[in-house]
């Protein structure tokens, strides 16, 4: 399925005493990239919540291959790798555009929670938007 | 009015490339100290929200006098300096216990928001707890 | 002096249980806006550090006038209000572009620290760039 | 190998619009727990850095089983699961003490970086401290 690329500049407050982006910040960047991914497919995660759905992260994995420093620009590539009945797998590749090297890759598993606060089958119209 | 002291150790991810606690983190620490301040007076900010009240920050000021480094222990002293009809002023002094020096001082102004999502007179029972 | 505008979308992880941008995040956004302010004037804060200078925040003030919610776009306007011998005053106005209302305004005072780790007169070439 | 338990109260600014601890914060809490783990074994991560060593995270995994809300107390259990020549595997279990349920579990892989900024065999004295 198609990819979305979100460019993010590392903030001073996101870098640690080593001068590198602190490992937890990639999870914020993954989320920001997912938000843009939704927007490029004609909806927003916010609108999903307004319809009574949530898509919380149930699993996250990240592999840190190379560093990202303060002021570096990171291109976070995001795509849907798999859609199950009630779950979605997003994958990520973060390329440090300042160095040209891949810095991080990872994935997040999400479960579709419905208005009853229970896992539900992904509604067909949402599924259709996600498969673009 | 009486003080509460909250001890907080600076996390690696809270320190910046200079090796100092990033300036925004003090606002998290101020909030953590306010939470403990409530608890020491017999209520929690959470219980306030459950009763339909909120106490959002409308103003914040901080003066950074000395650095706090990764792994330093910061003692955040917090007290109520003033209570108006619908507003509260908290003051803070952060002492770096590792160096023995005051690192930061500041204040936050809060407004009491009621169940109608408008500023309201602080209810007498909440006011009573806050004046301890 | 001239203004720079930095557009920032509120991340899910930057919003709190009220659904509003948590107050500390504005300090990250102020920093991001300052970074862009430098870049628009032909230098980077990173290059300043590489030359042995630092410009730590010694004072911050913010007034929260209206809320910013998850996914709202905030336009942070930043400009230099005053330059003293060794200190700089940045001012900020954050406009919530999603609602059209000003959400936050504030300032930060910075001191120029030289290679000897002491406050120094702002070097003329840096001052010249900053006065654009 | 023996466990360390670090108790952490969820800050308001660490909870998201769902009212749950945002997923990235667990990585801060894992780090805080590792710091306490070191301290209980007679050294600090800071002292390791002062000796010229670093132990950056090269891989992280987390499984979110149940929620943690604002003001909940989370007990993060941490232990070393495996030590290789130049790498260490920490494992984590986060128990929400407010609900009594396990909320999150995960691991981090770290590589020992020496004064030459390259992966090195873990020095015997550091290894000895870690195996307690």
Image (tube, coloured by chain):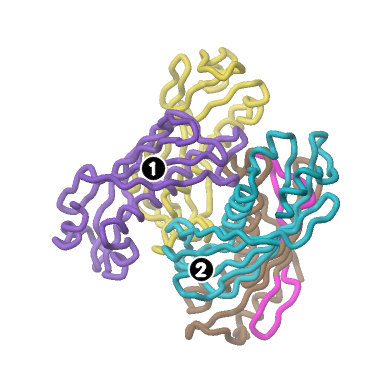
Chain colours: A purple, B brown, C cyan, D yellow
- C3 relative to B81, above or below: above
Instruction: Name the side, left or right, on which B117 lies relative to B58.
Output: left
Residue D116 place in picture, x, y as percent? 59, 16
Circles 1 and 2: CB distance less than 8 Å? no
One can see residue B78 in this view: no
Query: Residues at marks 1 and 2, common chain?
Result: no
Q: Quadrant of residue B4?
A: bottom right
Question: On screen, D120 above or below A3?
Answer: above
- Residue occupied by mark 2: B46
Q: Nearer the viewer, mark 1 or mark 2?
A: 1
Chain containing the residue with disc 2: B
Q: Where C122 sits versus C28, above or below?
A: above
Q: Is residue B65 magenta?
A: yes
B34 magenta-colored: no
Q: Viewer-proximal residue, D76 or C21?
A: C21
Residue at position x 64%, y 76% in the image: B129
Secondary structure beneath disc 1? strand
Q: Which residue is mark 1?
A: A76
- Residue B55 appears in view: yes
Cα distance, mark 1 to mark 2?
36 Å
Tell me, for residue A47, which label it has, or none.
none
Q: Residues within 10 Å of mark 2 (few under 14, many from 20)?
A: some
In what quadrant of the picture does the N terminus of chain A appear? top left
Residue drawn at x 80%, y 38% is: C114
Q: Mark 2: which secondary structure?
A: helix
């Amino acid at each position: 399925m198609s990819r979305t690329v979100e460019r993010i500049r590392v903030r001073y407050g996101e870098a640690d005493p080593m001068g590198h982006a602190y490992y937890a910040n990639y999870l914020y960047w993954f989320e920001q990239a997912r938000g843009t991914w939704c927007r490029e497919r004609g909806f927003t995660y916010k609108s999903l919540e307004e319809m009574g759905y949530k898509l919380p992260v149930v699993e996250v994995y990240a592999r840190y291959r190379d560093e990202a420093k303060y002021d570096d620009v990171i291109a976070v590539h995001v795509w849907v790798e798999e859609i199950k009945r009630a779950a979605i797998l997003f994958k990520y590749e973060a390329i440090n555009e300042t160095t040209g090297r891949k810095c991080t890759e990872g994935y997040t598993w999400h479960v579709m929670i419905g208005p009853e606060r229970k896992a539900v089958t992904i509604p067909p119209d949402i599924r259709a938007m996600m498969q673009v």
